[in-house]
Structure formats: C-alpha cells, structure tokens
Amino acid sequence: MSTPAAPISPDASLGLECQKLAPESVAEVRREIEHHLATTLGRHKQNATRRDWWLCTAHMVRDRIYKRLIQTQATHSAHNTKRMYYLSLEYLIGRMLISNLINAGLLDTTQSALAELGIDLWEVCEEEVDMGLGNGGLGRLAACYLDSLATLDLPAIGYGINYEFGLFRQEFVNGYQVEHPDEWARYGTPWQLCRPDYTQTVRIYGYVEDRFDACGNPHPVWLGAKEVLGVPYDVPIAGYGTGTVNFLRLWSARASEEFDLQVFNEGGYVEAVREKAMTESFSKVLYPNDRTENGKELRLVQQYFFVACSLRDIIRRWRRSEADWDTFPDKVAIQINDTHPAIAIAELMRVLLDEEELPWGRAWDIVTRTFAYTNHTLMPEALERWGMPLFGRVLPRHLQIIFEINAQLMQRVLAHWPNDLDRMREMSIIDERDGKSVRMANLAVVGSHSTNGVAAIHSELIKERLFPDFYALWPERFNNKTNGITPRLWLLNANRPLARLIDERIGHGWTRDLQRLGELEQWADDAAFQNAFMAIKRTNKERLAEVIARECGVTVSPDALFDVHIKRLHEYKRQHLNLLHILTLYRRLLNNPSLDIPPRVFIFAAKAAPGYELAKTIIKAINSVAMRVNNDPRIGDRLKVVFLPNYRVSLAMRIIPAADVSEQISTAGTEASGTGNMKLALNGALTVGTLDGANIEIRDAVGEDNIFIFGMTVEEVEALRKRGYRSTDWYAADANLRTAIDWLCSDYFTPGEPGVLAPLRHSLLEGGDYYLALADYAAYCACQDQVGEAYRDRAQWARKAILNTARVGYFSSDRAIREYASDIWQLDPLPVS
Ligand SMILES: *Cc1c(COP(=O)(O)O)cnc(C)c1O
C-alpha cells in the first residue's frame, strides 16, 4: 500500500442527514438549546458546565421526539393496530444523546448550533452516564431490537424494570475487581417521563382459599396478598429516518398508600416507613449475574412485579378498542426474552380465569396464541428453576395454575407416549429431583406458540438436545431467529469515519438495508479503498490508544495488531485460554528475542459477577500478567496486555472500531449466538473463533479465507466428554501448555501474593477443566500464529477486513426483526406521517 489516505477526523460530521424528516435550521436548534439552558436548567451561559450543555441539548432533541411520539401513538390507536410487546428483565442501552440526534436527523445541525455557542458536541456527549439496565448480550439484544422495531415502523412497546441501580461500575485495585453501585439516574435523566396516571396495582404473597360456587364448582380465591404499585417511566425510542417513535415502559415499585395508612394509624410510623422501603426494593437493583440467578426470592418478586404491571397495562390498552377476549391474540403479541418473564403465562391465565371468569380451555387457547419465547441458553445451570416452597409462598395462586397446566401436559404426554414415565419426568414443568422445583423453560415452551433459538446451530441444539420431546410433540413451534445488531449504533454512531467512507462509495442506503454493504466488495482489492479503510482503522486505534493511556497508564502503538477480547467474564467464554496463549507468546519472545512477529496489543474488557470467584481470579490473572509484560524492557513494544475497566456500551463503541482481531473462542456448544462477534466483524475486525453460535454463520457469510476458525466442534466436544476428558493428560502431553500453566501460577506474576492464582490452576487440572481450554490450546496457538503471519501482508489483511464489513449485512437487527414480525408476530408496519 502506497500513499496514506487523508485522515478523516472521527468527529467529522456525517454530511448526510436523513432527508425524510423536516429539516431544521441551525439557528432554530441553537435557540431551543439556549431556551432550555435558561428555563429548564435556570442557568446563565457564562456559568454553564458541560453537563448543563449536555442536558439542554438532550431536552432540545427530546422535545422533537415527544412530538413524534404523540403522533405515533395517535396513529396506532386510530388504526386499532396489532402491537408487539417485548418483555425483558434487561435493557442495555448505553448513552442516548447521539443516537437520538442521529435517529431524529439532527446530528449535524446540533453540532453546528453548539459550535456557534463555542461548545463541542463530542466533549458534551461524554458527560452522559450509560443507561446500563442489563448485564450483557441479552440486554443489548433487547436494545438493538427496540431500535429496529421503531425504524421499521412496527407498533411495539418494550416493558422492563426501572432499576435504581444498573449494572455495577467496575474498578481495579491491585488487579482485583472492585464493584461500585451504579446510581445512573441519581440526579434524574432527561430520557424518562414519569406517567403516574398509568400506575398499576399488583398483588404478591398471601394464600389461596378454595371456595365453591352455587353449582359446587371450585373457585379458588387469592387472599392476604400484599399490594404494590408500579409507576411507569417511559423512554421514547425514535426510529431512524422515520416518523415512528415507540417507547420503553419501565416500572418503579412504590408502596401502596392504603397499606401505609393502615400501619400509620396503628401507630407504627417507623415500621410503616420500613415496610414502604422494602416494597420499593422490588425495583432497586439489577441482579449482576449474567445467565444464572440462583433462587433468590427478590429476583422472583422482580420478575412477577414487572410482568404483572405490564400485563395489566397491555390489557388496559386492548380494552380501549376491544371487548371480546377471542380478539386478544389478534391485537397483542408478547415476546418473552428468555424465561425471566415466563411467569406472564401463569399470570395471564390467572387474570382470564379468576378475574374474567373464562373457562380453562378458552383461556389457555388465548394464552398460547399470545406468547412466544426466545431461548438464550442450553447450559443446564443457566436454566431457571424455582424451589417450590419459595414459589408457593410468593405466588400461591400461580403455583396452583402451573400444577393444572402441568396436569394437562402430562395427560397429553401420556396419550402420545403411553406408559413412558421417563418422558413425563423430562417434560414435566415440575422437576421432582432433589427437592421439587418449577422449570420456567418448560412452562415457556408449553405456554407459547413459538420457541426460538438465537443462531442456527443453537436452534438445532434446542430441538435435538434441550427439548427433544417437546420437539417431537410440537415440531411446528420451534424455529430459529439468528440475532442481529443495529447498524445505526454499531457502525453509523460508533464508527462515523467508516460510515462516511461507505456513504461516499455506495450512498447512505446501507443504514436501513445493511445487505447493501455487499456493494463494497468491488473495492476489496482496490489500493486506494484499502488505504482509506485502513487509515480509518488507524485513526480509531489512535483514539483507543488514548483511552488505554488514560485508563490503564500503558502506552500502546497504533501500529501494533489490536487483538480484542471483550464480553462478560465467564469460563465458557474462555478468557483464560487467551491468557495461556499470551503466556506462550511471551515466553517465546523471551527465549528468542529476534523472533519475527508483528507487535501485538491484547485488549480485554469484562465484568465478572461479584459472586463468581473463579471469574474474578481470571481478571486478577490477566491484570497480573499485564503488569509484568508491560513493564518488561526485554519485550518493549512487541507485546502489551491491557484490561480496560468498566466494560459497557459506550466503551464497546470505542474499542470495536479499533479492533483488528475479534476473539470469539467459547467452547463449542456454549455460546448461544453472541452479538459482539457481529459488531466486530461489521467494523472490519477478523474473527478468531470456534464453530460456536453465530460464528458459524459469520464464517459462511464472510468466507473461510476471511476468518480464523480453530478448535473442536460441538460433536467433538461431546465425543471427548463421553470418552472421559482428562485435562491432566493434555497438560502432561504438551510441554508448552505445561510451562504456561506452571508459570502463571508461580510467584513471577504475583510477587508478594503467593498462591492467589492457584484456584485457576486447580480448576484447569484437578477441577477437570469443564470448558476444555487445555484440549483447544494447541489449535488456538497454531491459529494465532496464522493470524500473526496474515497480518504481515497489509494489502491482503485490508482485503479481508473490507470483505468482513461488506459481507455481514445479514446480521442486522432489522433482518432479525423482520423475521420475528412475519414468522412469529404476524405484525405489519404502520408508517406514521
Ligand atoms: C454486545 C455487548 C455484549 C455481548 O457481547 P458477546 O461478545 O456477544 O458476549 C456485552 N456487553 C456489551 C456492553 C455489549 O455491547
């Protein structure tokens, strides 16, 4: 590659606003911002802080979005349209100012308006605290789907919990993770609007009394329940380049006033206030465990609280235009994001039976036609189950209903497979093993008309391994919806220079039709385009190097290969396999100082669940190795290891555009799909990955020459485990592997803290290495050598990177949402003028 292309500033304006929306003048926008500074914030320009400018800019765009929100809701009501309701315990949204400006078509105008005031938009937007109401991929998927639903003009509302504390803020102290509370909306947020008039009252706890009507039919009544108020806070969700503004309704728990009054009157003022605080704890904090939540009562209470509020709200809206329950599934589709909201199935049954007095059969038909379920995991420990005593105490009437659902299911199974007790045990919603428990995944499959996995292989494994019996009974219910990501956030917003380069070549249509990126293929071998593409990558790496210097105090060269491993810290994601390779590389460099390999920066970012000790040990291990490597004068710039603290959406947006290599190295069969893999490939990073989740479909899309696949397949993993995997044999047989593990756990990396990394070694050897890191180690190292080799040929590398961007259009969340809308929801777009 010859002449370097002219650098494009990452903060350059896009130069292309969406023309569909009414253009506004810079002067107008400026006037509005100044107006909010004076009237909403009560500030004079001279004393305004950056946060003030952020806030009044947010109010300016919010005003415009609200106008469209009103128009959208009026249109939906006027057409009495079907709506889709997305129930999710998590929404990982990140910052909203730039997204809202982009989606409202106001980015360039606002940038100019602020510039006239002497204010830099890109400095201002750094003031925003991420809205982090989720743990990882599942919550981020929900956020991408909301963006696509609005952009595609689909009538939809998201429901969730307005956690006062989102996912914890992570800090490192001496290499150890320390968690801090994330009071993200401590001083309020401009993105939420409280709607007290839509407050819902729901009941929880209590007991059931069996009563009988005049004809002797049983009429159970739920008594002695505690009342809780759900107060809705709405977050508007603006579509990109369209008039549609949907919303996300998040519930805050409040104590019911009647309840307070009673205790007050009895003279127990302090007790009443304490009781009130306990009730309000229902929406206090997001549980920080990604994938597992082990039977905590408050978690079940949270799930029921938000589901019950949401269903009441859905029914209230349906009643505005309908009265006959049989129309309910024609107007209402409900998607449940994993089993966390699956209690909605029992709750809607309860409403229909106990409050609406529908007969069982009719109620059940309405319920199953309404709900659809997305499964996110095959791992047995991540499948939700609730101990029966706990469940019965929190939701006594729902437990009864679940028993009845299960009784009918067992009859059905018996009719299909006479005398097959094993089959009944497998399929029962009630698990009879080690203390009875309620299996939420079974309830979700039985009570819905659709069960989907989130990548092709995952959906196959659901049918073959997780639910073979349900699949045999209802094959038509099972389907695949490969995950997607929104191109507005992950390319247009996160990588504006690349977005502009693409605009220059193929126009702006890709932002709403990502497959159009395929048109870039024609320039994959074009030196000028390669130069421009790689110059942008280089600029993004410089920016990330600044972040690394600030956050980690480590200087890295933007000329080095940036190798990125960012996601939740989990054994199945195998950050420790990456670390073993780093140790191997480090030792090779020490043994052979003239070893000719491209300089590499290994970049990690990940939060570990606060109670997940081994994950925290892996963080300590990576930080300890980083400390040594980065300060080893023998190594110089040839190898650096950095662990950026506090992984979150806004940090991901900085890292991803700067990545050369994307680490997607989970044990085959464990990562349902992944979406980080899609974001990185879209931004021109080459994947080093196993044949797991969506990596397989990414390989099919980009072509084998443009991805680095290694390691065991699902079948090989299964066969190895069946044979009896003994990690110690692999340790004994591979000198490099042995050295890496022994070295890691020596005092060399943790001087003064002998043995702190021993639990990691123990889990890999005596512990049996369940995720087979040792078995994939040699293949991984060989693959990484190929990566280093490939990186030397800059033109070939550029070609591969361009082809990644050009060929991953399929992984747009717009494509995924279109599939959900047509296959599962029967939902049509309704454009808003
Ligand atoms: C995309 C994303 C994830 C999910 O990443 P995976 O690699 O798919 O596990 C998690 N956290 C954040 C902040 C993300 O943006």
Image (cartoon, rainbow, N blue to C red):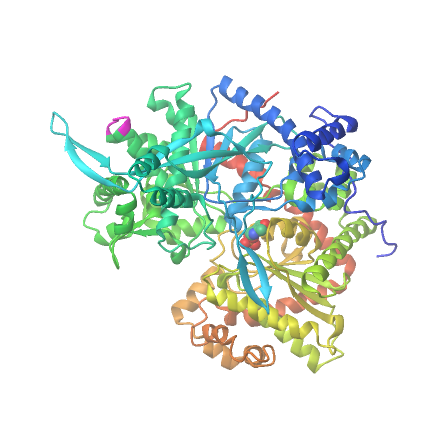
**Residue 515 showing in the rendered view:** no
Left or right: where 613 falls relative to 549? left
Quadrant of the snapshot with the C terminus: top right
Figure quadrant of residue 451: top left
The answer to whether residue 472 is magenta is no
**Residue 185 showing in the rendered view:** yes
Q: Main secondary structure of the magenta part?
A: loop
Identity of the residue furthest to the right in this view:
3
The answer to whether residue 358 is magenta is yes
Left or right: where 90 falls relative to 519? left
The one nearer the camera, 466 or 169, is 169
- Residue drawn 54% across and 20% down? 75
- Residue drawn 64% across and 42% down? 489
Give coordinates of residue 337: x percent, y percent: 45, 43
The one nearer the camera, 674 or 392, is 392
Give coordinates of residue 201: x percent, y percent: 37, 32
Residue numbers of the magenta segment: 355-359
Give coordinates of residue 694: x percent, y percent: 54, 51
The one nearer the camera, 418 or 234, is 234
Give coordinates of residue 528: x percent, y percent: 83, 49
Above or below, 771 against 795 in this view is below
Left or right: where 35 falls relative to 295? right
Above or below, 622 against 693 in this view is below
